[in-house]
Image (tube, rainbow, N blue to C red):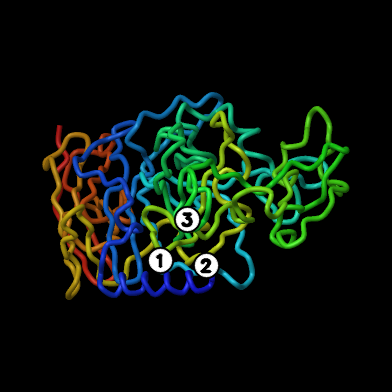
Amino acid sequence: MKNTVIVIALIFAAFSVTKGQPGPEITSWILNTTNATGYNGIPSNVQTVQYSASQVYVSASCIPGYNIGPWSANPNTPTNQNFVCKFTRTPVQNTGTPVFTGLGNTGLWSNGVAIFNPKDGQYWSGSAFTMGATTTGFNRNALVYEGASFDNCLGHPAPGGCYHNHVNPGCLYNSTLTTVHSPIIGYAFDGFPVYGAYAYTNSNGTGAIKRMTPSFVLAASTGSVLLGANTASAAASPATPTTRNGGPPVNSTYPLGNMLEDYIYLAGSGDLDFHNGRFCITPEYPLGTYAYFVTIDATGYPVYPFVLGPTYYGTVQAGNTGPGGSHVTISEATTVYTPGIGTNIHTTGIPEIKFTVEPNPTQEYLFIYMDVSSTNNVKGSLVDAKGKTVRTIDFLQPSIAYSLDMTDLSNGMYFLILETGAQKTTHKIIKSN
């Protein structure tokens, strides 16, 4: 019966995409339609949502619309990440080699802020912790080791300025509403939605609203736990805890729960599967979808694995993850989504580079506004009168404003060059007192 439901849901999804209907993967984002700013005057939430028959492209600053900070003992500062992330409109289960949720972005919350996995970026390397992550050893729990630096919205900035949440984003939605189905609060990079903590008791959309519980349990405190117990290979038959096998000792310094691998997957012990989701009917997907759920306890405190499990449920497209990730190049005709309108913008031909700059002349900052009908992925450079490049800015996207700091540049003439693979335009800029 379940397979039949899945097939029907996929047929429905394919029909909707073919017809060009904006589905939840397009309409669930919190669009900034008023040029509102957040932390440090940076444009907040999602700036643009574009879509084709098969993909959705989300451009965002990674800065939420609510107040963030301060961050105790965290020297990093949030900056505009100029994200362009790609989400498939027809996500499918990955039936091949499981893909682990790596460090950095694993998806986007609905306000364009990054979703991070449960790891804090350090793992046990034999006798001490070292930077990075491992899929076969012991990783530190971000809530345990970084929780003190979380702000009131349970987020903090990473090196490089990426503001993110490892756990339930406290200010994004009201997680105290325990009698209604939680909303979609983001999408993972495999294209499946992330919901808040509450859903129907039964996956067929019936029953009372309840808090979704994970199926990971803390190993019995018998002195140690199994190495790699919660990796994908353990999903089918979790082993009995034995030892950490070269991991940190279980003691007052490293008690159970400090390492992510202290949690083992026990199928059926909770509502959710190894990926921290389930196939179910939701208000936005009446025919069913696979969905992830953030996990919290009855008091609202985050519970491992917090958002996504150790691996993605679906197939992850290239471009969103890894070094330089979340800056996808858009190479197909798209439609810019406008709530209630869905105006066609990029449907024929090659869109032009369209922009305005002000003030010109300028004394301090040059502001570049990319027109809503401009082409995507524009690269900018500011060149002085001698031909030397003094500023660069990448991934300029339609409808977003950008700035170039010229305060330390000498007075004189400069050239702003905007280009893509197919187009190039030059604009003269004057710097004066």
Q: Is residue 416 visible?
A: no
Q: CA distance from mark 3 to mark 2?
A: 10 Å
Do callouts 2 and 1 mark residues in contact (Cβ within 8 Å)?
A: yes
Q: Earlier in the sequence, mark 3 or mark 2?
A: 3
> In the shown orientation, is residue 399 left or right of residue 93?
left
Q: CA distance from mark 2 to mark 1?
A: 9 Å
Q: Amino acid at mark 2?
A: Thr
Query: Helix, strand or loop at disc 1?
Result: strand
Outermost residue, front side: 207
Query: Helix, strand or loop at disc 2?
Result: loop
> In the shown orientation, is residue 253 left or right of residue 73?
right
- Where's the N terminus, which quadrant? bottom right
Residue 302: x and y in percent read 58, 36
Residue 250: x and y in percent read 83, 36
> In the shown orientation, is residue 93 left or right of residue 349?
right
Q: Amino acid at mark 1?
A: Thr
Q: Is residue 49 visible?
A: yes
Q: Which residue is mark 2?
A: 315
Q: Which residue is mark 3?
A: 188
Query: Helix, strand or loop at disc 3?
Result: strand
Q: Amino acid at mark 3?
A: Ala
Q: Alpha-carbon neighbours of circle 2 within 10 Å: few (<14), some, or many (≥20)?
A: many
Q: Earlier in the sequence, mark 1 or mark 3?
A: 1
Q: CA distance from mark 1 to mark 3?
A: 10 Å
Q: Which residue is mark 1?
A: 88
